[in-house]
């Protein structure tokens, strides 16, 4: 699925570009513009290529390794030793690499970092290429400034999802079935069965792959919403019955006296599901606005 976060992003071939990407990722990761590249090519850098203060005012250093094939633990130890001379003293050093995640190396670094923390020395960690990509993917402008070729793919995803979003919000409207669902009291009061027709249509049509969203945030809500609406319509089919007016249905009011346990169990379930559907619909609207409008 060609969203930014799920795309296979090629690491840069240039070490200079990789340092620029690492700088951008650091600012986003720690929510601080107070990060800078350290020195220039040919200058002694004391094991640090990017440095700055994080959102907790801790001194962070990053050593960039444009090493797609991996980083050895010996290299990590050497860079830690180099960074000991960096001033002011670091609170934490990160090795930033274009390599893929390596569980063995992560464990070695965790052990090293724990020993250093006990000794009162700065801690050590590692950021792999996937971590760096996830950081820059949180800001479209920054991501596309480094990877403009991805912009058209992401726009196609948004166009697809915007069409699905418009269809769904036209079917399930806040001033239509969702509002009615929120206000309707099922405790023995009759209702026009046709009021719930959009819910039945949603159940029938929106559990098909053609109706799925590509953005995972929206698809997760659609699935949850379908599950709740499906449960609600099942309850309508099994626990409500026609009144003397065939176009109106109700939870039989006589149950309140003849079968009170069943009556209140059914009514409670209706109201619980209605509340969950209304909340999920609200989440869908807000997420859609954030992902498809604000994120455009």
Image (spheres, rainbow, N blue to C red):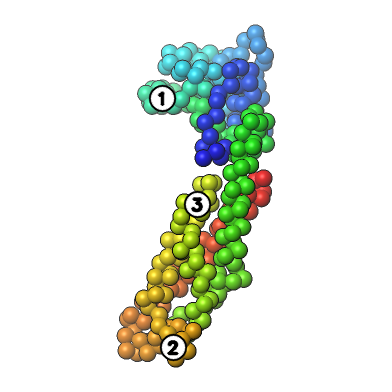
Q: Nearer the viewer, residue 80 or 119?
A: 80
Which residue matches tag 1?
102
Tell me: residue 142, above or below residue 264.
Answer: above
- Whichever of labels 3 and 2 marks the residue nearer the N terminus, that label is 3
Q: Nearer the viewer, mark 2 or mark 1?
A: 2
Tell me: residue 275, above or below residue 43.
Answer: below
Q: Nearer the viewer, mark 3 or mark 2?
A: 3
- Whichever of labels 2 and 1 marks the residue nearer the N terminus, that label is 1
Q: Quadrant of the C terminus?
A: top right
* Image location (x, y in percent) of residue 193: 49, 79
Mark 2 crowdedness (10 Å alpha carbons): few <14, some 14-19, many ≥20: some
Which residue matches tag 3?
210
- The residue drawn where x is 38% and y is 27% is 103
Tell me: residue 186, above or below residue 92.
Answer: below
Q: Nearer the viewer, residue 201 or 133?
A: 201
Q: In the current view of this chain or complex, which residue is farthest to the top?
A: 42
Mark 1 crowdedness (10 Å alpha carbons): few <14, some 14-19, many ≥20: few
- The residue drawn where x is 50% and y is 56% is 222
Tell me: residue 85, above or below residue 94.
Answer: above
Q: Quadrant of residue 118?
A: top left
Q: Which element type, helix, strand or loop, lies under badge 1?
A: loop
């Amino acid at each position: 699925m060609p969203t930014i976060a799920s795309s296979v992003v090629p690491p840069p071939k240039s070490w200079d570009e990789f340092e620029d990407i690492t700088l951008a990722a650091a600012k986003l990761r720690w929510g601080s513009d107070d990060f800078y590249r350290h020195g220039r090519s040919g200058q002694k850098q004391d094991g640090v290529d990017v440095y700055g203060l994080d959102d907790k005012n801790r001194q962070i250093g990053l050593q960039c390794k444009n090493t797609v094939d991996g980083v050895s633990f010996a290299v990590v130890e050497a860079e830690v030793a180099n960074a000991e001379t960096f001033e002011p003293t670091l609170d934490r050093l990160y090795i930033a690499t274009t390599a893929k995640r390596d569980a063995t190396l992560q464990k070695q670094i965790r052990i090293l970092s724990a020993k250093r923390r006990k000794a009162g020395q700065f801690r050590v960690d590692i950021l792999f290429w996937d971590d760096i990509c996830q950081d820059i993917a949180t800001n479209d402008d920054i991501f596309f400034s480094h990877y403009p070729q991805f912009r058209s793919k992401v726009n196609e995803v948004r166009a697809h999802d915007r069409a699905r979003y418009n269809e769904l919000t036209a079917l399930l409207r806040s001033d239509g079935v969702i509002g009615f669902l929120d206000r309707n009291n099922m405790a023995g009061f009759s209702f026009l069965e046709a009021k719930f027709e959009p819910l039945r249509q949603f159940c029938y049509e929106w559990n098909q792959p053609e109706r799925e969203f590509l953005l995972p945030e929206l698809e997760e809500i659609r699935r949850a919403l379908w599950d709740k609406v499906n449960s609600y319509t099942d309850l309508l089919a099994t626990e409500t019955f026609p009144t003397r007016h065939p176009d109106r249905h109700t939870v039989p009011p006589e149950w309140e006296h003849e079968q009170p346990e069943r009556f209140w169990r059914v009514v409670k379930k209706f109201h619980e599901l209605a509340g969950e559907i209304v909340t999920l619909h609200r989440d869908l609207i807000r997420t859609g606005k954030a992902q498809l409008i604000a994120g455009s």
